Image: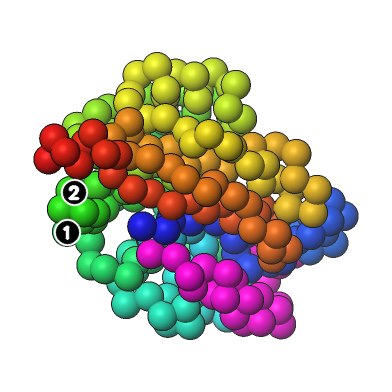
Amino acid sequence: MRILTYNIQVAIGSCRYRHYLLHGWKHVMPHGQTVPNLDRIATVIAPYDIVALQEVDGGSLRTHFINETCYLATRAGFPCWKSVVTRDHGLFAQHTNSLLSRTSPLRVESHRLPGAMEGRGVLEADYELDGRVVTVFCTHLALNCRARLRQIEAIAARINQHDSAILLGDFNCQPDSPALRALLASTRLRPGRWQPASYPSWRPRRVIDHILATDDLTLDNLQATPALLSDHLPISAEVRVTEAAAVAA
């Protein structure tokens, strides 16, 4: 199973530090590059089986009222998609976490995460992989370290309820951070052998977009795709059931 996580930055297309200032207005107002950028993003995500997206808009003024998840699913040929609004700014912005997949999930749930401000959550879905139910979690964690630790604690509690799990998304922290260390210490999640840098997209130095899987699953071919369509790069991996787990099953 090929999976990918991508913070698409609402299809604004920032690819330089100066764009945070020059393109800041695009976070609240419509612009002409939304559809062309979404079309390019659709090309990037099309080869994968499951795609987790962050900073997607659910249909507001800034995106010409386009539900970006629905648009990407249609353009990239994903028959199944689920989008949950985590931060609702009414007419001006609808922040969501989203999952797109080639096969129908067996179950989908969404959960709000604790924090100083509302707007963070985790999307949870069950899929079948080689006769095994694998629970996929898509999240976008807070910028604040203390809030991230609380969110990691809540996510870990949910992950520990499942035999096989994958957690992917924008964690806003690097592998040696307190939040990541706490997560790995309290769950069976493990990173792949290689953890590619994803931020900023034009000169990636920070490993803040992650794919982690429980120890009955193997993550192969982790890589960042050099797509300058957001301030983050997409991170992908191939997931398979380990031989020992398959024999046990």
* Magenta-colored segment: predominant secondary structure: helix
Residue 43 part of the magenta-drawn span: yes
Report crowding for label 1: few under 14, some 14 to 19, many 20 or more residues within 10 A (C-alpha): few
Identify whether 131 is placed above or below 112: below
Element type at mark 1: loop
Q: Is residue 235 left or right of residue 96?
A: right
> In the image, which residues are magenta?
25-49
Report crowding for label 2: few under 14, some 14 to 19, many 20 or more residues within 10 A (C-alpha): some
Q: Give the residue at mark 2.
A: 133
Residue 7, image quadrant: bottom right
Dot 1 amino acid type: Leu
Residue nearer the viewer, 105 or 12 = 105
Q: Is residue 80 left or right of residue 53?
A: left
Pointer 1 and pointer 2: residues touching (CB < 8 Å)?
A: yes
Q: Give the residue at mark 1.
A: 106
Residue 10 part of the magenta-drawn span: no
Q: Is residue 140 visible?
A: no
Quadrant into which the C terminus falls: top left
Q: Is residue 101 visible?
A: yes
Residue nearer the viewer, 30 or 222 = 222
State the residue at coordinates (59%, 37%).
Answer: 195
**What is the x, y in percent for residue 168?**
44, 45
Residue 42: image tag: none
State the residue at coordinates (67%, 71%).
Answer: 29
Residue nearer the viewer, 142 or 233 = 233
State the residue at coordinates (84%, 51%).
Answer: 17
Quadrant into which the N terminus falls: bottom left
Image coloring type: rainbow
